Image (cartoon, rainbow, N blue to C red):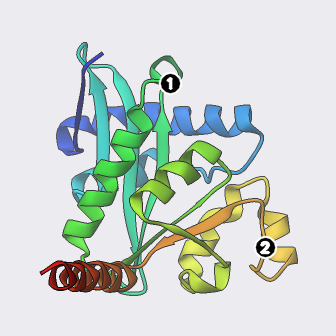
C-alpha cells in the first residue's frame, strides 16, 4: 500500500481528534504509558510544522508523530508515534519515525533528540536511527516535559523514584557524539588508504 508521509499542516487539522483517539486506544491496549494529548495540542504541532502525518491513498489517517522542544531547543523529542491498527505491520512506523527524526535534525540541528517508550519495536527503530539507551538524568530537566507524563498510568513509578526510573526506556541521539563518530570513521578510512598505498 502507498502512503503519503508529509509534514502535517493546516489541511490536516481535522485529523486531530482521530489522532488523539488512536493514542488513547493504543494506551489501553498496551496497558502501558502513552501520554494523552488534546486535539488543540496536536493542531498546534501541525500549524507549527512540527508533526508528521501519514495518509493512505484513500485519504485515511494511517500514522502520526510530532516534535516538541525543551530547554530552549537544547532537546527535541519525537513523540506520539501512532499507527492506525489496520496499517500496522507494514513498516509504516519506521517510515513515520524516520521522517520525524529527519525533520527534527533539519529544524533543530544541534538539539539532542530523545524519546521515552515501552515499545520494543520503537526501541529498535530508535536504535537504527542512532539513539542510545540512557538514564533519565541525561534527558531534559524541563518540568513541563515531565508534567506531560502525568496522564500515563505509570506516573506514580516515575514520581516515587524521583524521576530516576519508570517502565519507559529513555533513548537519546546526541548530534555531537554522532559527529565525532563520523570524524573517527573518516580518520580510520584515511589511515587505511595510506597503509594500502
| Disc number for residue 117 | none
Residue 18 in the image, given as x and y percentages of width and height? 45, 30
Q: Earlier in the sequence, mark 2 or mark 1?
A: 1
**Which residue in the protein does label 1 denote?**
89
Query: What is the residue that sits farthest to the left in this orientation?
Result: 197
16 relative position to 30: left or right:
left
Residue 27, x across and y down, in percent: 67, 40
Badge 2 is on which residue? 165
Image height of 94 relative to 138, above or below: above
**At 38% from the left edge and 73% from the top edge, which residue is drawn?**
69
What residue lies at 12% left-to-right and 81% top-to-bottom?
197
Most foreground residue, 139 or 156: 139
**In the rendered view, would you say 60 is above or below 197?**
above
- Examine the rendered structure and indicate whether residue 49 appears above or below residue 174: above
> Mark 2, residues whose alpha carbon is within 10 Å: few (<14), some, or many (≥20)?
some
Which residue is outermost to the front? 197
Vertical relation: 38 (above or below) 184: above
Residue 194: name its quadrant: bottom left
Q: Secondary structure at mark 2?
A: loop
Marks 2 and 1 in Cβ contact (< 8 Å):
no
- How crowded pointer 1 is (Cα within 10 Å; few <14, some 14-19, many 20+) is rated as few
Residue 124 placed where, x, y %? 54, 50
Residue 109 pos. (x, y %): 24, 77
Q: Give the residue displayed 56% in from the left and 67% down from the top.
A: 171
Considering depth in this image, is 176 or 169 the residue closer to the camera?
Answer: 176
Left or right for 13, reference 171: left
Of badges 2 and 1, the one in the foreground is 1
> Distance between the Cα atoms at labels 2 and 1?
30 Å
Q: Residue furthest right?
A: 160
Label 1: state its secondary structure.
Answer: loop
Residues 36 and 157: in front is: 157
Residue shown at the point (55%, 73%) measured from the top left:
145
Amino acid at each position: 500500500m502507498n502512503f503519503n508521509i508529509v509534514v502535517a499542516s493546516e489541511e490536516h487539522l481535522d485529523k486531530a481528534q482521530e489522532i488523539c483517539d488512536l493514542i488513547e486506544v493504543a494506551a489501553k491496549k498496551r496497558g502501558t504509558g502513552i501520554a494523552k494529548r488534546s486535539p488543540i495540542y496536536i493542531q498546534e504541532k501541525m500549524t507549527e510544522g512540527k508533526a508528521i502525518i501519514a495518509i493512505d491513498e484513500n485519504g485515511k489517517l494511517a500514522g502520526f508523530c510530532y516534535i516538541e522542544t525543551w530547554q530552549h531547543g537544547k532537546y527535541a523529542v519525537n513523540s506520539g508515534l501512532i499507527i492506525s491498527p489496520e496499517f500496522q505491520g507494514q513498516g509504516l512506523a519506521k517510515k513515520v519515525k524516520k521522517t520525524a527524526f529527519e525533520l527534527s535534525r533539519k529544524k533543530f540541528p544541534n538539539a539532542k533528540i530523545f524519546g521515552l517508550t515501552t515499545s520494543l519495536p520503537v526501541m529498535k527503530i530508535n536504535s537504527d536511527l542512532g539513539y542510545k539507551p540512557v538514564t533519565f538524568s541525561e534527558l531534559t530537566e524541563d518540568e513541563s516535559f515531565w508534567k506531560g507524563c502525568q496522564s500515563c498510568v505509570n506516573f506514580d513509578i516515575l514520581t516515587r523514584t524521583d524521576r530516576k526510573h519508570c517502565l519507559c526506556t529513555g533513548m537519546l541521539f546526541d548530534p555531537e557524539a554522532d559527529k565525532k563518530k563520523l570524524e573517527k570513521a573518516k580518520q580510520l578510512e584515511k589511515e587505511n588508504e595510506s597503509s594500502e598505498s
